[in-house]
Amino acid sequence: MPIIKSAKKSLRQSKRRKARNIKKKDAVKDLVKKIKALLVQKKNEEAKKLLPAIYKALDKAAKTGVIKKSNASRRKSRITKSLSSKS
């Protein structure tokens, strides 16, 4: 446990940031799972409607440093590719 005042504050900050980062990662994971489930069920139109939401979630995660920029663009590319191949 931290003893110095600044270390205590740093611990509080890191806990808050970790919770925020996990929330953003979970949002991305949930959307990806939803799209994959829709693709398995052959509901391509509904999956395409979720595309802007997942783009937004990935871009926000990349912007805030939760995931890297190239990771976000790779995921967007793969999801779009899977949507277009299933159509």
Image (cartoon, rainbow, N blue to C red):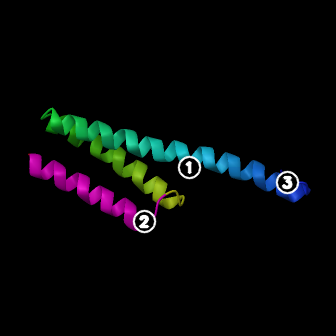
Q: Amino acid at mark 1?
A: Asn
Magenta part of the protein: which range?
67-86
Left or right of residue 41: residue 79: right
| Marked residue nearer the N-terminal end (3 or 1) | 3
Up the image or down, 48 lies above or below 2; here it is: above
Q: Secondary structure under badge 1?
A: helix
Q: Amino acid at mark 2?
A: Lys
Is mark 1 in CB contact (under 8 Å) with mark 2?
A: no
Q: Residue furthest bottom?
A: 70
Up the image or down, 29 lies above or below 63; here it is: above
Q: How many numbered marks does the figure carry?
A: 3
Residue 10: x and y, percent? Answer: 78, 56
Q: Which mark is residue 69?
A: 2
Residue at x 82% of width, y 53% of height: 9
Local packing at callout 3 (Cα closer than 10 Å; few below 14, some 14-19, many 20+) is few
Pair 3/2: label in front? 3
In the picture of the structure, the residue carrying the numbered disc 3 is 2
Residue 78 image-quadrant placement: bottom left
Residue at x 40% of width, y 53% of height: 58
Q: Secondary structure under badge 2?
A: helix
Q: Tell me if residue 70 is in the magenta stretch.
A: yes
In the picture of the structure, the residue carrying the numbered disc 1 is 21
Q: Amino acid at mark 3?
A: Pro
Residue at x 69% of width, y 47% of height: 15
Could you tell me what secondary structure mostly forms the magenta stretch? helix
